[in-house]
């Protein structure tokens, strides 16, 4: 029932001349492992643009030789190391760390990805665990970062001057339940809920931990008629000046 309702809603929006806008971000990339190759092949074979969030310190040069023309690279932190204190939620950017240290780390990762990814790199930070301290956001434009992407409805389109935010909304991995696929009904429930938000609906995946059900769901999702999958130029158009 959920899938049928989802299809009907997408068709209704399409027929009304305002098709649902989807975009796809995949996190924790770095190595040219088989799962990454499968991800890239899935994107290419379905013609769906992919925004690959790469951990700079884990990035292998070989990965970037595999990217096709519809893949864009985002910055996924720098080392993806949890620095949170005991009892705090995981984050690479804890409030107790000197902000200069956090900014220097982001800057180093920015330079490394810009070198490795070249023209496929977008100056957008997708922080690990989708968390970043607020005082760091205002300093990101000074080092070249023009966008930020996390998960859930955004509080503001511009969380700091010169910085735009475009979020994902549906993470298909159930992290607290064995890193399994969240299930088709739950994925569609979240998607239908997110369609009510006036933002492009972002799908969040993590290729390294996908089970067969997650891969099967993505194939089914990409076969849907009705949504329009957004390109890098559409999702992160505001980065064009900095990127060029």
Image: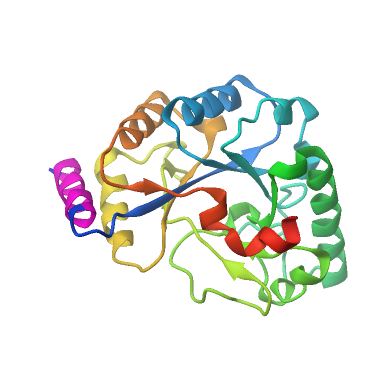
Image quarter (top left, top right, bottom left or bottom right) of the C terminus = bottom right
SS majority, magenta: helix
User: Quick one: which residue is furthest to the bottom in this view?
Assistant: 161
Residue 140 coordinates in the image, percent (x, y): 75, 68
Picture residue at 51% right of the left edge, 48% below the top: 231
Q: Is residue 209 left or right of residue 148?
A: left
At 72% from the left and 66% from the top, the residue drawn is 94
- Residue 141 visible somewhere in the drawing: yes
Please tell me which residue lies in front, 169 or 232: 232
Give the percent coordinates (x, y) of residue 234. Answer: 51, 56
12 inside magenta stretch: yes
185 shown above or below 194: above
* Quadrant placement of the N terminus: top left
Q: Above or below — where is 174 with respect to 217?
A: below
Task: Pick whichever, 61 or 97, lies toward us.
Answer: 61
Q: Is residue 102 left or right of residue 71?
A: right
Location of residue 223 (image quadrant): top left
Q: Residue furthest top?
A: 34
Going 53% across and 33% down the picture, which residue do you hit?
Answer: 207
At horizontal 60% and vertical 34% (from top left) the residue drawn is 69
Count of marks placed on residues: 0
Residue 123 in the image: x percent, y percent?
71, 56
Left or right: residue 4 compared with residue 138:
left
* Magenta stretch bounds: 2-14
The image quadrant that residue 30 belongs to is: top right
């Amino acid at each position: 029932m959920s899938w049928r309702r989802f299809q009907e809603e997408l068709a209704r929006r399409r027929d009304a001349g305002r098709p649902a806008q989807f975009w796809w971000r995949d996190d924790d990339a770095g190595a040219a492992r088989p799962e990454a190759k499968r991800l890239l092949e899935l994107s290419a074979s379905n013609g769906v643009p992919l925004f690959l969030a790469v951990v700079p310190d884990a990035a292998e040069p070989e990965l970037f030789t595999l990217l096709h023309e519809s893949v864009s690279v985002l910055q996924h932190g720098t080392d993806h190391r949890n620095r949170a204190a005991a009892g705090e939620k995981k984050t690479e950017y804890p409030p107790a760390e000197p902000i200069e240290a956090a900014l220097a780390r982001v800057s180093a990762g920015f330079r490394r990805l810009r070198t490795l990814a070249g023209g496929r790199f977008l100056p957008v930070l997708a922080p690990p665990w989708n968390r970043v301290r607020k005082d760091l956001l205002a300093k990101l434009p000074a080092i070249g970062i023009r966008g930020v992407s996390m998960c859930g409805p955004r509080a503001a389109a511009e969380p700091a001057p010169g910085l735009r935010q475009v979020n994902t909304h549906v993470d298909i991995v159930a992290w607290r339940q064995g890193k399994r696929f969240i299930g088709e009904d739950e994925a569609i429930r979240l998607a239908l809920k997110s369609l009510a938000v006036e933002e492009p609906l972002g799908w969040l995946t993590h290729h390294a931990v996908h089970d067969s059900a997650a891969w099967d769901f993505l194939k089914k999702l990409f076969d849907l008629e009705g949504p329009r999958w957004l390109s890098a130029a559409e999702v992160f158009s505001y980065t064009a000046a900095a990127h060029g």
